[in-house]
Image (cartoon, rainbow, N blue to C red):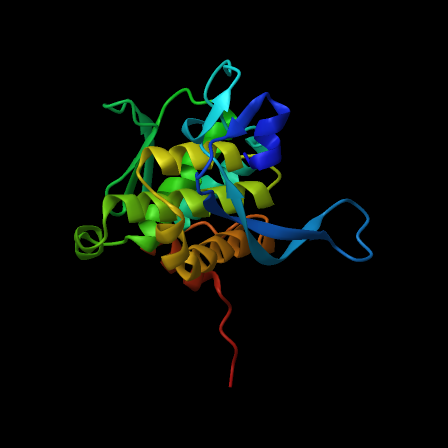
Amino acid sequence: MGFHGWKGVGRSVKKGEKGIGITAPLAFRKKNAATDEKEIRGFRVVHVFDISQTEGDELPSLTQPTGSAAQWIEPVERLIEFKGIDLKYGLLGGGAYGASSIKKITVLSGLKPPMRLEVLIHELAHELLHPDRETRKRLKHSVMETEAQAVAQVVCQALGMEAIEHSADYIHLHNGDSEVFANSMTRIQKCASGILSDLLGNEQPPVRRSDSENKKESKRQPTLAA
């Protein structure tokens, strides 16, 4: 959380500590909308601090993403499938919540909806930003994790969740910092915007169909005489 947020829970940012840059969407209520539906009109950088950068009262546990996430899980799963990426749930080693292995995403079974949604978006970001072995060999681990988590944070916040504190913890854990974040800003924004456009622009992303289904569909199309 930010400088004043830590103050509110009885902790202070240590002298000389530098904030971790996180992209946050600028959400505005749509004009003439019947509900509180919002639209994204840009992004801004906010600086937050990991708990290790603060001192003071003990906190009960590490932060977790929060908010209403259940309604977005299925659309994100459909989007992953539409991108041609295999998705499955199961067990993962090493305490990982998710894994991206090029055209395949595995998510730990049993996660609560907010964490499940964030992990899905995080791994989707890996697939979009780091789509092949060459890219994954070229980029440092800290760069890839910072990019994927920053995208997840932007998208989750735009969907109404609160994940800034968790993202700061995660990025700090993987040795990410403001310099890494700044160098990847354009890539992060482009990827997050693309995911949000797919989710918010189309309430139900198109479902991929097999070749046989497409052939059946073409046979049903009427033939117009010249």
Residue 124 position within the rendered picture, expressed as x and y whole percent measured from the top left? 38, 45
Q: Quadrant of the N terminus?
A: top right
Q: Nearer the viewer, residue 180 or 67?
A: 180
Q: Nearer the viewer, residue 186 or 79?
A: 186
**Is residue 17 in view from this perspective?**
yes
Report the label total: 0
**Is residue 209 in view from this perspective?**
no
- Residue ranking furthest to the front: 15
Question: Who's the residue at 29% across and 22% down the image?
Answer: 95
Please identify the quarter of the rendering in which residue 90 is found: top left
Drawn side of residue 162 relative to residue 145, left or right: right
Please identify the quarter of the rendering in which residue 17 is found: top left
Question: Who's the residue at 52% across and 77% down the image?
Answer: 224
**Residue 94, relative to residue 25: is it above or below?**
above
Residue 169 position within the rendered picture, expressed as x and y whole percent measured from the top left? 42, 32
Drawn side of residue 167 relative to residue 177, left or right: right
**Residue 152, relative to residue 61: is it above or below?**
below
Residue 176 position within the rendered picture, expressed as x and y whole percent measured from the top left? 34, 43
Q: Nearer the viewer, residue 154 or 76?
A: 154
**Residue 162, relative to residue 139: is it above or below?**
above
Residue 29 position within the rendered picture, expressed as x and y whole percent measured from the top left? 74, 51
Question: Who's the residue at 56% across and 32% down the image?
Answer: 69
Q: Nearer the viewer, residue 142 or 70?
A: 142
